[in-house]
Image (tube, rainbow, N blue to C red):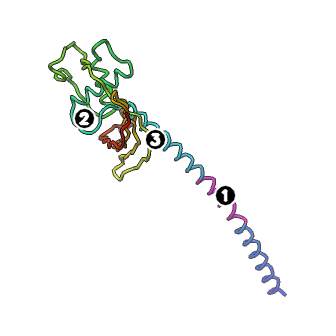
Amino acid sequence: MKIKSIISLFLTLAVLASFSVISANPADEVDSSVADNAVIAQNADMDKVQETRFLNMLNHNFAYDEELASVEDLVNCAVIALCASGSTDGSFVEESRVEDYLYNMYGVEVENLSSVNESFPKKEGYVYIIPRGYTVYKHSVESVRLNEDGSYTVTTNVVLDSHDGDEEGKAVTLFVKNSNSQFGYNIISSDIIVTAFEV
């Protein structure tokens, strides 16, 4: 009789244990699914913020291709950007504004701009605005790829709006993190491939 009672008790405990295991699993799956969805949503929000930041930088950038390799070209492209934003003083832009723009956008530190545009008019503490036409770039993000070294390759569709008409193309831009930049990133390179032209 004792053996039957022990077996009966053992079977009852085994059945109860299996119910608790079965009932625990769906709850775990629900909790896990909710947590996974929250992480996915958070990552999507972060990706959107990052994409918006890249797009903002590109739409305020006037330096492309080999211009990014020349300090003088970068300075003159920065001057165009500052003119477009209304940060000028007649025919000049404050050197400090140009220096801030160069650092925040490209991570380039220039301490002395006096040798830039040497053959043009000078004003202490300012950079001369060379009179010229310029192209406005309008980007839309096609893809953002995180590289193994932590940099980002951003491919955009771009419309180049100039006095000659509109051109369409693609831009491939390399961004690196810079926590000291107001943007949080710097543009290292940006190449445009023109694919169409409209008159």
Left or right of 13 in this view: 32:
left
Q: Residues within 10 Å of mark 1 (few under 14, many from 20)?
A: few
Instruction: Name which of mark 3 and mark 2 comes first in the sequence.
Output: 3
Query: Residue 196 got which mark?
Result: none
Mark 2: amino acid: Glu
Residue 56 percent coordinates (x, y): 43, 33
Placement of the N terminus among the 4 image quadrants: bottom right
Instruction: Name which of mark 2 and mark 1 comes first in the sequence.
Output: 1
At a point 36% along the width and 31% down the height, the residue shown is 165
Circles 1 and 3, Cβ within 8 Å, touching? The answer is no
Residue farthest right in this picture? 1
Q: Is residue 105 above or below residue 25?
A: above
- Place residue 160 in its image quadrant: top left
Query: Residue 51 got which mark?
Result: 3
Circle 2 SS class: helix
Query: Residue 67 got which mark?
Result: 2
Residue 30 lies in the magenta-colored region: yes
Q: Residues within 10 Å of mark 3 (few under 14, many from 20)?
A: some
Left or right of 51 in this view: 195:
left
C-alpha gap between disc 3 and disc 2: 24 Å
Residue ID for mark 1: 30
Residue 95 percent coordinates (x, y): 27, 20
- Magenta stretch: helix, strand or loop mostly: helix
Q: Which residues are magenta?
A: 23-36
Residue farthest left in this picture? 119
Residue 111 lies in the magenta-colored region: no
Residue 94 percent coordinates (x, y): 29, 17
Circle 3 SS class: helix
Mark 3: amino acid: Glu
Left or right of 2 in this view: 103:
left
Circle 1 SS class: helix
